[in-house]
Amino acid sequence: MKTQVCIIGGGPSGLLLSHILDLNGIDNVVLERQTKDYVLGRIRAGVLEHNSVQMLRDYGLGERMDRIGKPKNGTLILWENRPEFFIDVKKWTGKQMMAYGQTNITEDLYAARESAGGAVICEADNVALNDIETDAPFVIYEKDGAKHRVDCQIIAGCDGFHGPSRRAIPQTHRREFTREYPFGWMGVMVEKPPLDDFIYAYHSDGMAMAAQRNPMLSRYYVQAPITDSPSDWSDDRFWETLLHRFPAEVAAQIQTGPTIEKSMAPLRSFVSEPMRHGRLFIAGDAAHIVPPTGAKGLNLAFSDVHYLQRALVAFFKDGKHALLEDYSQTALRRVWSAENISWRLTKLLHVFPNEDPFEQKIRENDYDLLLMSEAAQHALAYEYIGLPFDD
Ligand code: FAD
Ligand code: DHB
């Protein structure tokens, strides 16, 4: 098979890139290792920043989001024995976020690809990238026991943290920056009405978080040791821990019940530089991971797609290489900003095992500064809503 762009990975970044390239008349094929149902079943992000909302609208994908998503003015922080604080992005930036789940977005993207007749090949096994340093790279994959070859001009590696694309860049040409955290987020989904706000709750036993998917579906998280698995957390243990970490008056409003999903998300900061090698361009979780504090991962994946589609359109339509040459550098500026805010919020809102009392005093002082300084409130809101795209 021959195409212009072979996209590896049919998650949100691969599908969005495919959709936008198609709108621009650029031929592409998506290779996804899993079944479509598996991809749609993964429960992940819940919050979109303004730029991502705008991208979905601009590319004709905003109809259901605007119908059933919930615009949000910011996120609330509750702190044991201290006043609450609202990260008020509306007040400081004039922009809003949107509560709209990744599951819905992926459904919308698959529907768009299907109605346009886009080539999304699921259950593609043993995907291997070849000749990425030449002008004629190709990808080999297996499906139903048969081997296939995709010849292309560009490979877009949108295959998440565990995919093969990043690893196709020779070790000698890439540098990885990593921070592992000694805890994860144990998350549950419950068919009960959520609280009004997204809430991070700091407690000396650990962080807890209230999130939402729709009027009858709530998502909650508690900080848990990295070694824990969902089987260590009965529903009773989960709810007891969660309610204990919220102030009593808020805990009283949380509607608990049998959970319909429970999973553990490890916390990690990770960046692989550069995001390009020869004719391979990587985007989204394939290139970087942020801890979920700050809700930046999916938004960052969309930001990479913004820069990559722009560069590919210039390349294929006008024969211009400059934006492709600049892709890695441009995308990484925003990546590092998101890494920075996600890391700082993670440090602020979690309990780190074996930390000395000095660090705790600094944490409390950081929070107190937010409570009293409008400059600090403005700066946090500006970073939290996501930096504007570079021109
Ligand atoms: P992925 O979603 O990982 O998609 C990659 C795709 O590539 C997958 O479908 C995978 O099956 C496929 N693939 C892998 N290997 C291969 C292979 N060998 N061949 C072919 N295909 C392959 N982000 C936010 O912005 N806001 C939030 O509120 C938020 N909350 C989160 C909460 C949790 C608990 C977690 C875990 C994450 C959260 N994130 C959030 C992060 C967000 O979910 C990810 O950043 C996002 O999914 C990245 O999209 P992606 O398309 O780059 O990668
Ligand atoms: C979710 C929301 C957040 O604000 C966040 O930081 C992490 C996850 C969610 O909706 O799942």
Image: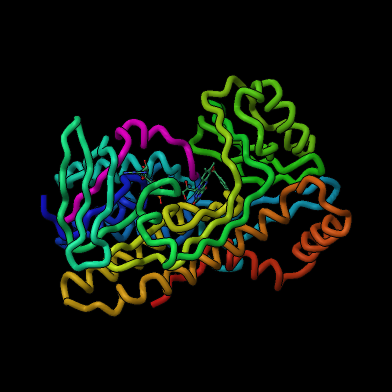
Along the line of sight, the residue nearer the viewer: 348 or 248: 348
Is residue 64 at least partly visible in the picture?
no
Q: Extreme front residue here?
A: 172
Direction from residue 206 to residue 17 in the image, left or right: left
Q: Residue 246: x percent and y percent?
A: 75, 38
Question: Taking 253 as reference, is 372 above or below it?
Answer: below
Along the line of sight, the residue nearer the viewer: 183 or 387: 183
Q: Residue 103: x percent and y percent?
A: 40, 39
Is residue 290 at least partly visible in the picture?
yes
Question: Taking 275 as reference, is 71 above or below it?
Answer: above
| Quadrant holding the C terminus | bottom left
Q: Kindly identify the residue that appears in the image at 40 percent across and 65 percent down.
A: 275
Q: Extreme left residue here?
A: 1
Direction from residue 202 to residue 20 in the image, left or right: left
Question: Taking 15 as reference, is 312 above or below it?
Answer: below
Q: Kindly identify the residue that appears in the image at 24 percent across and 48 percent down.
A: 30
Direction from residue 249 to residue 151 in the image, left or right: left
- Residue 49 is a magenta residue: no
Q: Residue 102: x percent and y percent?
A: 43, 43
Q: Kindly identify the residue that appears in the image at 51 percent across and 30 percent down.
A: 216
Residues shaded magenta:
27-45
